[in-house]
Image: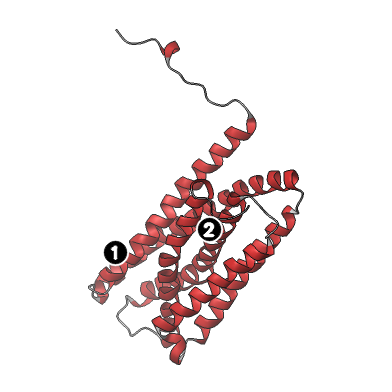
Amino acid sequence: MLPSFATIPFHPPTDFGSNYEIVLRWIHFSAAITWIGLLYFFNLVNMPLQKQMDAPTKAKVNPPLLSLALWWFRWGAVVTVLAGIVFWSRITVLDARTHGYSAGSVFGSFFLVWTLAFVIEQGVLMAGKGALNQGAVLTVIFAVVLIAAAVIFLQWNSQVENNRVLAIGVGGGLGWFMLLNVWGIVWRVNKRLIAWTKETSAAAPMPDKLARMMRQSFIASRANFFISFPMLFFMGAASHYPLFGR
């Protein structure tokens, strides 16, 4: 005999705040799985595969594959970051009211610091000559820029005592940086690659300008791949590993 549904200890929260937050979390997680999953696909599967494909195969496979994959990739990034920012904003505003600091200052420093980090990265990539085109040098530069961005954000908001506010400010900041990479570099370059492939069937040599842009896209995508690991760490640490605050 089946047990009565009335005996199941099912007691979901009825207040608005709890339900609002779980919906945001669910949207954030679902979109993040799509975005980061495709990021790993591009770096671990597609990039090695592209080296084994000849020009006719690339001309046939890449336009539909990249168009569809990059659509989910870039919009998954948007939904992930926007849902995360909305969720983080609610936490920050409530904590600011309780402890008497300016939530606006936290938000302003977040967007200023992490956007500036992207601007510096893009400037380095656009230079792209000599040492600035070497992977090891770029790795050091990007690591210094991102660590400096995290330190500046944390120092700017030293009055905040809430670990979730600060940890998401760092992890979410890395996510914002990655989003700018997706739209500002990876998609901007790859839509030109798709158009060029359709027009030439990839039979002609790639123009120098497009080749340089593809190098930038590769570096930005590979940077996002490695940045995703500390980003996920700080997002998890927000609720499960207190690092910041008093």
Residue shown at 54% from the left, 37% from the top: 22
- Say which element carries label 2: helix
Q: Can residue 111 be seen in this view?
A: no
- Residue 201 horizontal/vertical position (percent): 32, 75
Residue receiving disc 1 = 45
- Say which element carries label 1: helix
Question: What amino acid type should be assigned to the residue bearing mark 1?
Answer: Val
- Residue 159 horizontal/vertical position (percent): 70, 57
Residue shown at 73% from the left, 47% from the top: 99
Furthest residue to the top? 1
When the figure is inspected, residue 216 is found, relative to residue 243, above or below; the finding is: below
- Residue 243 horizontal/vertical position (percent): 54, 55
Residue receiving disc 2 = 171
- Compared across the picture, whether 53 is left or right of 155 comes to left
- Residue 152 horizontal/vertical position (percent): 63, 68
Furthest residue to the front? 246
For this rendering, which residue is in front, 204 or 90?
90
Which comes sooner in the sequence, label 2 or label 1? 1
Q: How far apart are marks 2 and 1 (CA)?
A: 25 Å
Q: Can residue 79 be seen in this view?
A: yes
Question: What amino acid type should be assigned to the residue bearing mark 2?
Answer: Gly
Residue shown at 58% from the left, 39% from the top: 21
Q: How crowded is mark 1: few (under 14 residues within 10 Å), some or many (20 or more)?
A: few
